[in-house]
Amino acid sequence: MPKQRRLVGDEKENAVKILSMKSNKKLLQSHIKNSVGKNVALKDLHNLHAKNKPKGGNDFNEILKEMKKYPSKCPYNNAIFVTVNTTKKLSLPNDIVFWL
């Protein structure tokens, strides 16, 4: 990234903090241009936000370990039914069954 667009130090920290609050990137771009004098592209702000976004916890082993901590209240005794569908909602009956 060219020097006239690159955010460094406090500039970058402030932009990341503001982006983490789901702010309007266009308004942030305007604010940076007025306060710092750098012409940051919207794609730069998008990339900065993506780079500093917290990682999601989709590790299957971690999820399984967490689930084993709690006693089952399922009538099927320690069976967990997971259904994958287009609405991204969990539902019964089962498509995939995990036995603990």
Image: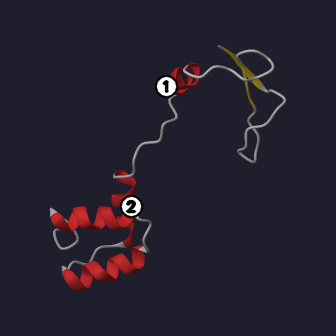
Element at label 2: helix
Q: Earlier in the sequence, mark 2 or mark 1?
A: 2
The picture places residue 76, in percent across and down from the top left corner, at 80, 17
Q: Quadrant of the N terminus?
A: bottom left
Element at label 1: helix
Q: Residues within 10 Å of mark 2 (few under 14, many from 20)?
A: some
Asked if residue 77 is positioned above or below residue 53 in the image, the reply reads: above
| Residue occupying image coordinates x 47% and y 41% | 56
The picture places residue 33, in percent across and down from the top left corner, at 25, 82
The picture places residue 39, in percent across and down from the top left corner, at 26, 78
Q: How many numbered marks appear?
A: 2
Labelled disc at residue 62: 1
Asked if residue 99 is positioned above or below residue 50 in the image, the reply reads: above
**Badge 2 amino acid:** Ser
| Residue occupying image coordinates x 42% and y 71% | 23
Asked if residue 90 is positioned above or below residue 26 in the image, the reply reads: above
Is residue 31 visible in the rendered image? The answer is: yes
| Residue occupying image coordinates x 35% and y 52% | 51
| Residue occupying image coordinates x 38% and y 72% | 42
Which residue position holds label 2? 20
Q: Is 55 left or right of 86, judged from the image as shown?
A: left
